[in-house]
Amino acid sequence: MDALAMTFSSGWASGINAYLVVLVLGIADRVGSVAEIPDVLGRWDVLAAAGFMFAMEFVADKIPYIDSTWDAISTAVRPTAGAVIGVLLAGDASSLEQAVLGVVGGGTALLSHLAKAGGRLAINSSPEPVTNVAASLTEDALVLGVVWFSLEHPQAAAAIAGVLLVVGLVLLLVLGRLARRGWRRWKKRDWKEQEPVRDVS
């Protein structure tokens, strides 16, 4: 159950920022020797690569439109990272358990990634950097907090990740409806402005 809970939490977090998840788990393995974390995540080359990519994402994620481009590129990366972390957390378990945890990690990462990417598209409808920076810093803080908390309290962290996932998906639906409504109003106003004025004399 703890492996499943950690997989769910890390899967949700990977959908937001996969490189930060690898960094947190790898550093925790280095400094705390947490038994549940596979040693491969604590390798120096893995930590160096994750640190470099996190630095790139840290900057790109705070610039309007660049963040959405980065999200598009990460559509394959984040769910894959969530699935791989799930399989690694299964350790030497049976292939069935590895498959289940891989699906849980990858599926959760995909859902949270879609919620993040959709939310950023909505935020970019008013392209000013303050909102993007605030959203990015909040996401990073939540990822760091949930993953670190899952090391000591995996089931509680999974519950928090579940709530955050549902909130993200609900916000995505609400923002999507608002965006569609605004688009219809804009198109209707544009059509009225272009409609020729009839001569009634």
Image (cartoon, rainbow, N blue to C red):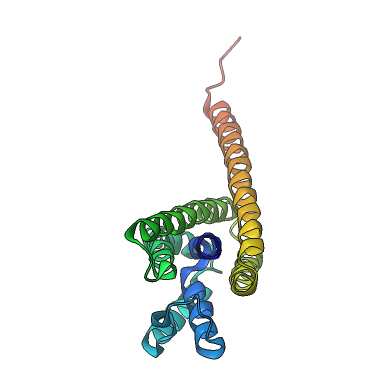
Viewed as shown, does residue 147 lie left or right of 49? right
Quadrant of the image for the C terminus?
top right
Q: Position of residue 176 (x, y in %)?
A: 57, 41
Q: Position of residue 98 (x, y in %)?
A: 37, 61
Which of the 4 quarters of the picture holds residue 90?
bottom left
The residue closer to the viewer here, 198 or 160, is 160
The residue closer to the viewer here, 146 or 187, is 146
Give the residue drawn at x 54%, y 83%: 28
Furthest residue in direction left, as rendered: 95
Which of the 4 quarters of the picture holds residue 46?
bottom left
Furthest residue in direction top, as rendered: 201
The residue closer to the viewer here, 20 or 87, is 87
Give the residue drawn at x 56%, y 20%: 197
Vertical side of 181 occupied by 142: above or below: below
Vertical side of 42 occupied by 122: above or below: above
Give the residue drawn at x 60%, y 54%: 123
Q: How many marks?
A: 0
Viewed as shown, does residue 63 lie left or right of 142? left
The residue closer to the viewer here, 121 or 129, is 121
Q: Position of residue 31 (x, y in %)?
A: 55, 90
Q: Position of residue 33 (x, y in %)?
A: 52, 86
Give the residue drawn at x 62%, y 44%: 170
Viewed as shown, does residue 40 lie left or right of 142? left
